[in-house]
Image (spheres, rainbow, N blue to C red):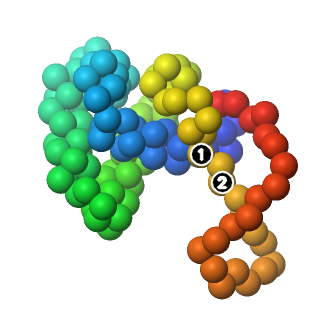
Amino acid sequence: MDAELVQEMVKSGATALAGLMAKAAWGQASSRVARMFGRGDRDEEATAELEVIRAEVLEAGDDREVLADQTAALRNRLRALFRENPEAVDELREIMREFTPQGAMRVHNVIRDSTVNSDIVIQSGTTDARF
């Protein structure tokens, strides 16, 4: 599998999972996510670890630093999972399709050889990229 695609799935997947943890849909998605991380051998352990992360996400509220830390923890877990089980990329993609609302796809812009002095980005055009 393309390394760039896997890296993008790590980033977008971690963000999507952290967001999903803060929503009611987590109740439906959590067992699938735990099976994906646990690989059938460690599902209960994965469930417990994910619930610790979820508790931090819920307690964080608007604290961006805590949310960033938990998203980073999920990125690290996904990176390790994909290294050992490349087929898990497809599992995560299916979970994201099912539980991430249409239109909530994350767009990542890269600006090279420029200086940006603002948090505001204006983007024009459309994309048909799908994960």
User: Which three-letter amino acid code belongs to the residue tagged 1?
Assistant: Arg
Q: Is residue 89 visible?
A: no
Q: Quadrant of residue 2?
A: top right
Q: How crowded is the residue under tag 2: few (<14 C-alpha within 10 Å), some, or many (20+)?
A: few
Is there CB contact under 8 Å for labels 2 and 1?
A: yes
Q: Quadrant of residue 44?
A: top left
Helix, strand or loop at label 2? It is: loop
Quarter of the image with the C terminus in it: top right
Observer-nearest of 19 and 74: 19
**Relative image position of residue 116 (x, y in whole percent):** 70, 80
**Relative image position of residue 127 (x, y in whole percent):** 79, 40
Residue lying at 31% horizontally and 53% vertically, measured from the top left: 70
**Relative image position of residue 118 (x, y in whole percent):** 63, 80
**Relative image position of residue 74 (x, y in whole percent):** 36, 45
Q: Which residue is mark 2?
A: 108
Q: Give the farthest residue toward the top.
A: 40
Check residue 54 in the rendering and tell me which mark sits there, or answer none.
none
Helix, strand or loop at label 1? It is: loop
Q: Quadrant of residue 120?
A: bottom right
Picture layout, residue 29 above or below residue 14:
above
Picture layout, residue 12 above or below residue 1:
below
Classify residue 81 as left or right of residue 117.
left
User: Which three-letter amino acid code belongs to the residue tagged 2?
Assistant: His
Classify residue 1 as left or right of residue 15.
right
Q: Which residue is mark 1?
A: 106
Observer-nearest of 38 and 17: 17
Q: CA distance from mark 2 to mark 1?
A: 6 Å
